[in-house]
Image (tube, coloured by chain):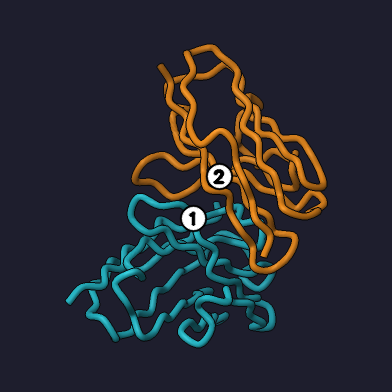
Chain colours: A cyan, B orange
Amino acid sequence: QVQLVQSGAEVKKPGASVKVSCKASGYTFTNYGISWVRQAPGQGLEWMGWISAYNGNTNYAQKLQGRVTMTTDTSTSTAYMELRSLRSDDTAVYYCARGEDTDYWGQGTLVTVSS
Amino acid sequence: DIQMTQSPSSLSASVGDRVTITCRASQDISNYLAWFQQRPGKAPKSLIYAASSLQSGVPSKFSGSGSGTDFTLTISSLQPEDSATYYCQQYNSYPYTFGQGTKLEIK
């Protein structure tokens, strides 16, 4: 069965960086991309970007350009999302999901940015 | 960016009822439209892709329709476990965007 298992919760100070991992299993990793979506407390879903697990091509949300990097490690079927220069409004649950139509989702990773 | 507008923002219905949620795109997205269910404290769950195709394992009480700019999600025979927030998302063109969500309460 398809599973996406994300890394644990993080607490970071403003200005720091965070890197969230998403380990995939149950399917051929390189046949699908990975989307990243975040959700601030009490808010809706926000699309952050997408990476092809086949060739590493990426597409990022304009508002995050320059602060976000998405990568994959095909040897371990793991995707990563790094967000730099963290601000308080980056506090959110971060989700990875399979493909562009996001048919399977990880359990979410809470990232708290606080001084 | 393509704006996705859902209506209503919230609704209340009784067990056994049928409800319809609408999602309107600010431009033509063909059928690149997905619907998700999110219960409190849980990750979103995919219900529908390509506007009307049911994800594997999702009960047939959920159905989607539409193309172009206007889409609907219909949930029939409501049960208490259908209480959740429902989101639409377009994946026709970057940046992919979500509707603001519709909170469904079961009376």
Left/right of residue B44 with respect to residue B2 in the rendered view: left
| Amino acid bearing label 2 | Tyr
Residue B93 position within the rendered picture, expressed as x and y whole percent measured from the top left: 73, 65
Q: Quadrant of residue A6?
A: bottom left
Q: Is residue B71 left or right of residue B88?
A: right
Splitting the image into 4 quarters, where does residue B74 fall? top right
Q: Classify residue B56 as left or right of residue A88.
A: right
Label pair 2/1, CB-CB below 8 angstroms: yes
Report x, y in % for residue B28: 81, 53
Q: Residue under circle 2?
A: B87
Quarter containing the C terminus of chain A: bottom left
Q: Amino acid at mark 1?
A: Leu
Relative height, residue A28 to residue B8 (above, below): below
Q: Label 2 marks which chain's residue?
A: B
Viewer-closest of B93 and B61: B93
Nearest the eye: B101 or B54: B101
Counting labels gives 2
- Residue drawn where x is 64% and y is 68% of the image: B95
Residue A39, percent from left and from top: 42, 58
x%, y% of residue A110? 31, 63
> For mark 1, does the 10 Å Cα neighbourhood hold few (<14), some (14 to 19), or many (20 or more) residues?
many
| Residue shown at the point (61%, 75%) measured from the top left | A51
The numbered mark at residue A45 is: 1
* Chain letter for mark 1: A
| Residue drawn at x 41%, y 80% as measured from the top left | A83
Q: Secondary structure at mark 2?
A: strand
